[in-house]
Image: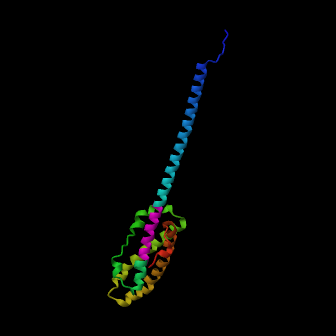
């Protein structure tokens, strides 16, 4: 048996058609792969941006919760000569901190340490007001309680508040100088 190979016009056209079809499939596959990779990268960027926005929003909320306590309570308490009327209505629950404590892993360890320390001391400090209020009718004992218990805690809380909000300012994209008492 002898087979002769011969190239005919139909054979050449069929071969070229097949080659073009293979090239088209390969090119289409490559374009699809590139488009899929672009879509994956875009989604990854969007998720990263969303995480950063949530982190910034949380940092901003914590920053102003701390700032509010520090400026509108701690500093006001001292400035108003130990007036306690505004303290009675001050929230002792720290809603931002309580509802987001599980998300602190987003921040640097030193910032988390400052936040935990601040909120621990703040809760302890605000709890002492029950005792302070109970002495309202005894000015001498109330003043002594202020000097021995509240004043040292006020100073400590003020220092801790500043450390905490200064740590949050870069994350929240807030200039510390823009915060004014």
Please give the name of the residue rendered at 48% of the width and 81% of the height, measured from the top-left corner. 155
Is residue 60 covered in magenta?
A: yes
Q: Residue furthest top?
A: 1
Q: Residue at x 61, y 22 (%)?
A: 12
For the point 41% across and 66% down, the residue is 96
Magenta region: 54-70
Spot occupied by residue 13 in the image (x, y as percentages of width and height): 58, 23
- Placement of the N terminus among the 4 image quadrants: top right
- Which residue is outermost to the bottom? 140
Residue 25 drawn at (x, y percent): 55, 33
Vertical relation: 75 (above or below) 50: below
> Picture coordinates of residue 70 (x, y %)?
44, 77
> Left or right of 141: which side holds 112?
right
Q: Looking at the picture, tell me which residue is in the foreground, 66 or 27.
A: 27
Q: Is residue 137 left or right of residue 44?
A: left
Q: Nearer the viewer, residue 84 or 21?
A: 21
Q: Report the magenta stretch's main SS.
A: helix
Residue at image coords 47%, 72%:
118
Q: State which quarter of the image contains the C terminus.
A: bottom left
Q: Is residue 156 magenta?
A: no
**Residue 108 point in image, percent of width and height:** 54, 64
């Amino acid at each position: 048996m002898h087979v002769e190979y011969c190239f005919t016009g139909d054979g050449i056209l069929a071969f070229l058609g097949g080659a073009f079809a293979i090239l088209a499939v390969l090119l289409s596959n490559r374009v699809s792969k590139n488009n899929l990779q672009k879509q994956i990268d875009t989604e990854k960027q969007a998720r990263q941006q969303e995480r950063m926005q949530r982190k910034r929003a949380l940092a901003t909320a914590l920053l102003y919760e701390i700032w509010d306590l520090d400026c509108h309570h701690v500093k006001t308490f001292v400035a108003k000569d130990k007036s306690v009327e505004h303290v009675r209505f001050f929230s002792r629950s720290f809603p931002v901190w309580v509802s987001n404590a599980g998300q602190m892993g987003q921040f640097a360890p030193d910032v988390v340490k400052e936040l935990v320390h601040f909120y621990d001391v703040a809760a302890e400090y605000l709890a002492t007001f029950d005792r302070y209020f109970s002495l309202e009718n005894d000015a001498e004992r109330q003043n002594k309680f202020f000097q021995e218990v509240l004043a040292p805690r006020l100073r400590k809380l003020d220092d801790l508040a500043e450390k905490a909000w200064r740590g949050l300012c870069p994350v929240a994209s807030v200039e510390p100088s823009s915060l004014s008492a």
